[in-house]
Image: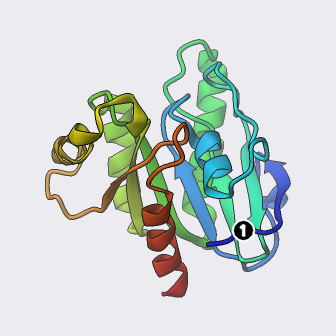
Amino acid sequence: MLVKNPQFEISAVSPKQYPQNDLPQIVLVGKSNVGKSSFINTMINRKKLARTSSEPGKTRQINFYNIDQKFYFVDLPGYGYSKMSKQEQVKVGEFIEEYLSKTNKISLIIFLIDIRHSPTENDKLMYNYIINTKRPFLLVANKADKIAPTKVLDTCLSLQKEINPLMDATILPFSSEKKIYTDEVWNFIEMILRT
C-alpha cells in the first residue's frame, strides 16, 4: 500500500477522546520496547511520525494515526515494563482493556513479539486475551534482522508453537531496522480491510 499523507491524530486515555468516525482501526499490542512505534514508521515509510524511544514504557497513552483517511494504526502502551510504578501499570492496563473491550471499530489486532526471545508470561496472557476478543489478529515476530536470515522461518514456527499451539494463527517476520517483510504484512492488512 502506498501511504501518502499519514497524520498523528490524537492521544487518548478514555473513550470520549477516541476518534468519532467509522474508519477501521488496526491495533498494535506487545510488551514495552518490542517496536510498535517503529513498526508504524516502517510500514508508512516515515522516520518519525510515531514517536520512538530506546527507553521502554515511553508510550503511556493510546495514540491514533490516521492513514490517508482509510484506517487508523492504533499504538497501545506496552506492557511488562517494571520501572513504571505499580499504580501507573494498573492505570495503563485499565485503559488498554477499556479500549479493547469497548471499541467496535477494531478490524485487526497486530500482536508484536520479539523473534529472539520465548514469549513471556505477559505475552501469553495478552495472547489469551486477544483470542477471547474473537477479533482477527496477526502475530508479528519483530526484530528479524537480529537473527540469521536462514533461521527466520524456523524461529517463527517454534515461536508459534509456544504461543499458538493450535498453529491456526498467521505469524509473519518483520524488521523495522532493515525494512524487510513489509509487503507480506501489508498484504495481510489489505486482505482484512477488504473483508
- Could you tell me which residue is drawn at 66 percent across and 55 percent down? 74
- Front-lying residue, 74 or 54: 54
Could one spot residue 13 in this view of the protein? yes
Residue 162, horizontal then vertical, whole percent: 18, 41
Residue 95, horizontal then vertical, whole percent: 65, 44
Q: Amino acid at mark 1?
A: Val
Taking the view exactly as shown, the residue that stands out farthest to the top is 83
- Front-lying residue, 143 or 114: 143
How many marks the image carries: the answer is 1
Q: With 179 as the anchor, is 103 left or right in this view?
A: right
Residue 95 against residue 8 in the figure, above or below: above
Residue 159, horizontal then vertical, whole percent: 23, 41
Label 1: how many residues lie within 10 Å, few (<14), some (14-19) or many (20+)?
Answer: few
- Front-lying residue, 91 or 122: 122
Taking the view exactly as shown, the residue that stands out farthest to the bottom is 195
Could one spot residue 75 in this view of the protein? no
Residue 194, horizontal then vertical, whole percent: 52, 86
**Image coloring type:** rainbow
Secondary-structure class at tag 1 = loop
- Front-lying residue, 26 or 157: 157
Residue 64 against residue 62 in the figure, above or below: below
Residue under numbered circle 1: 3
Instruction: Indicate the quadrant where residue 55 lies.
Output: top right
Q: With 119 as the anchor, is 2 left or right in this view?
A: right
Q: With 36 as the anchor, is 162 left or right in this view?
A: left
- Could you tell me which residue is drawn at 38 percent across and 32 percent down? 122
Instruction: Please identify the quadrant where the N terminus is shown.
Output: bottom right
